């Protein structure tokens, strides 16, 4: 059943509307209580009316039962006064009265059709035991009751001493009576019709109120939709504002943040294209200038040719470096980037990275120190992690001072391993912290040109760290040095 309802909602889009949900909820909240109230009032009235009718008739029948014993009616039914009383009660309540003696024989029937017959039923037997029984048959529209006929206080007003000693007097007969409840049913029908009319009027009113409120409540969300569509179609570029509800305000705030992020990404994309064009064009321009210079010089010495060709080779190498870094970025940007995860000895890997970079450090007289707190083995992509720490240590060397130092510290806890790479270099201004991982961004552009940086190394590094679900933080004091802290899980979790 639930699956069918889900399928129905999927086929009819309007049933998935919040407006429809609000309308239905308000309609149910309004109509169901009115229906329950109507039914409850009618049932309460019916129970009260039946209870009053039962109490009233039982009292009167008990008085008649007292008269039956006084006139010895169970043995002689010829008493006109008693018969008149019974007929009057039967006609008054549109019912029937049966008088049953101790032999279970019907001695009087106000309908005159069962006299002389024997009747044995559970109610009659229980009444002969002194128990009064009453039953309301709603379907037939009658109240049935049994009244025991016995010598009790109805005769004398008090029990005799022998009755007190020997217990209640025996039941000498039973009066079985049925009383019509047609007048109660008629009153119930009238009340039900009037209550139903009131309920219909209330339902119509609630229907209108529900339509109005559902439209009113959903209006701010329609405003959000229109505003978003305007942004999508390019008619509005400013942040949108719909402060009708706290929920719409949260939605709009989230959308504005997304819009700002999209603008930043778009600006970054344009800047990236511009930077790529510039970075790729610069070496080509230098090679063209060198080639044109050679062509314009007739009979140039071999030494000049060799010098120019060496410069051209360096520009080609620089071009190749930029293209390689760009390809690395493209691979990292793919959502399905694959990692070749293996268990790697991080102590050995960092020692190998430092060994490869020591020749560069010697050229600038930079001392390199590796300190390991404990042996660490982690599940990582060895190639990418090597690239991460190669880029960071190489930057620490290149942007260092002569006779400076670079320190690499390895540590781990039960979840992550941490590598701190600190140096005594030129440092990073605090305003540049948020930009150093952007593509082609350089803190000191002139210095970066001199050492041949492409501005892509830190961007590649950050991408590889994020692929491992790690993090990288930087702290620096301008003119004193920097510290990059890389934190990567020891156990790789597949995304």
Image (spheres, rainbow, N blue to C red):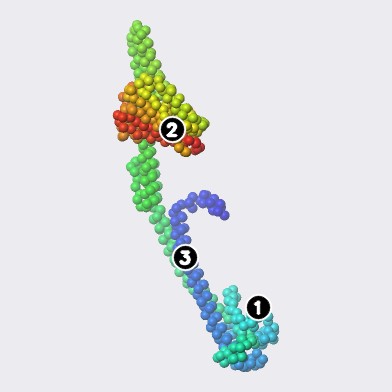
Residue 158 percent location from the top left of the image: 56, 90
In the image as oriented, which residue stretches furthest toward the front?
Answer: 373
- In the rendered image, which residue does mark 1 sit on? 122
Q: CA distance from mark 1 to mark 3?
A: 41 Å
N-terminal of the pair, mark 2 or mark 1, is 1
Side (left or right) of 398 relative to 68: left
Side (left or right) of 479 relative to 374: left
- In the rendered image, which residue does mark 3 sit on? 33
* Residue 273 visible in image: no
Quadrant the N terminus occupies: bottom right
Number of residues whose C-alpha sits closer than 10 Å to that of mark 2, classed few (under 14), some (14–19) or many (20 or more): few
245 w.r.t. 451: above or below:
below
407 w.r.t. 299: above or below:
below
Residue 259 percent location from the top left of the image: 37, 41
Number of residues whose C-alpha sits closer than 10 Å to that of mark 3, classed few (under 14), some (14–19) or many (20 or more): few
- In the rendered image, which residue does mark 2 sit on? 373
């Amino acid at each position: 059943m639930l699956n069918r309802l889900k399928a129905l909602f999927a086929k009819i889009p309007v049933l998935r509307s919040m407006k429809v949900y609000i309308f239905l909820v308000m309609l149910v909240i309004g109509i169901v209580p009115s229906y329950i109230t109507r039914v409850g009032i009618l049932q309460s009235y019916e129970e009260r009316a039946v209870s009053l009718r039962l109490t009233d008739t039982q009292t009167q029948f008990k008085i008649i039962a007292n008269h039956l014993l006084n006139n010895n009616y169970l043995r002689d039914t010829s008493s006109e006064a008693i018969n008149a009383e019974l007929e009057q009660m039967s006609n008054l309540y549109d019912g029937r009265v049966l008088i049953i003696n101790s032999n279970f024989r019907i001695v009087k029937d106000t309908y005159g059709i069962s006299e002389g017959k024997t009747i044995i039923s559970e109610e009659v037997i229980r009444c002969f035991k002194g128990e009064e029984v009453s039953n309301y048959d709603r379907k037939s529209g009658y109240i049935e009751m049994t009244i025991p006929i016995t010598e009790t206080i109805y005769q004398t007003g008090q029990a005799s001493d022998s009755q007190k000693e020997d217990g209640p007097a025996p039941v000498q007969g039973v009066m079985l009576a049925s009383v019509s409840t047609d007048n109660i049913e008629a009153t119930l029908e009238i009340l039900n019709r009037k209550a139903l009319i009131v309920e219909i009027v209330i339902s119509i009113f609630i229907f209108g109120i529900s339509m109005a409120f559902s439209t009113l409540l959903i209006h701010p969300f329609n405003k959000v939709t229109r505003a978003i569509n305007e942004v999508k179609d390019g008619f509005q570029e400013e942040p949108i504002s719909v402060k009708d509800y706290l929920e719409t305000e949260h939605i709009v705030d989230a959308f504005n943040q997304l819009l700002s992020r999209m603008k930043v990404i778009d600006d970054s994309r344009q800047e990236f294209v511009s930077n790529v064009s510039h970075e790729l064009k610069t070496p080509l321009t230098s090679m063209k200038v060198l080639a044109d210079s050679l062509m314009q010089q007739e009979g140039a010495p071999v030494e000049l040719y060799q010098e120019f060709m060496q410069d051209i080779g360096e520009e080609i190498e620089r071009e190749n470096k930029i293209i390689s870094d760009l390809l690395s970025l493209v691979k990292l940007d793919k959502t399905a980037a694959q990692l070749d995860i293996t268990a790697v000895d991080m102590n050995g890997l960092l020692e190998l990275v430092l060994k490869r970079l020591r020749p560069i450090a010697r050229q600038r007289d930079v001392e390199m120190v590796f300190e390991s707190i404990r042996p660490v083995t982690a599940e990582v992509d060895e190639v990418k992690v090597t690239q991460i720490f190669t880029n960071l240590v190489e930057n620490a060397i290149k942007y260092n001072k002569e006779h400076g130092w670079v320190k690499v510290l390895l540590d781990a806890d039960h979840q992550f391993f941490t590598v701190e790479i600190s140096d005594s270099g030129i440092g990073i201004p605090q305003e540049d912290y948020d930009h150093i991982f952007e593509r082609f961004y350089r803190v000191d552009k002139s210095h970066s040109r001199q050492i041949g940086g492409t501005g892509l190394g830190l961007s590649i590094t950050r991408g590889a760290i994020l692929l491992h679900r790690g993090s990288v933080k930087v702290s620096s004091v301008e003119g004193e040095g920097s510290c990059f802290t890389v934190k990567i899980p020891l156990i790789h979790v597949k995304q």
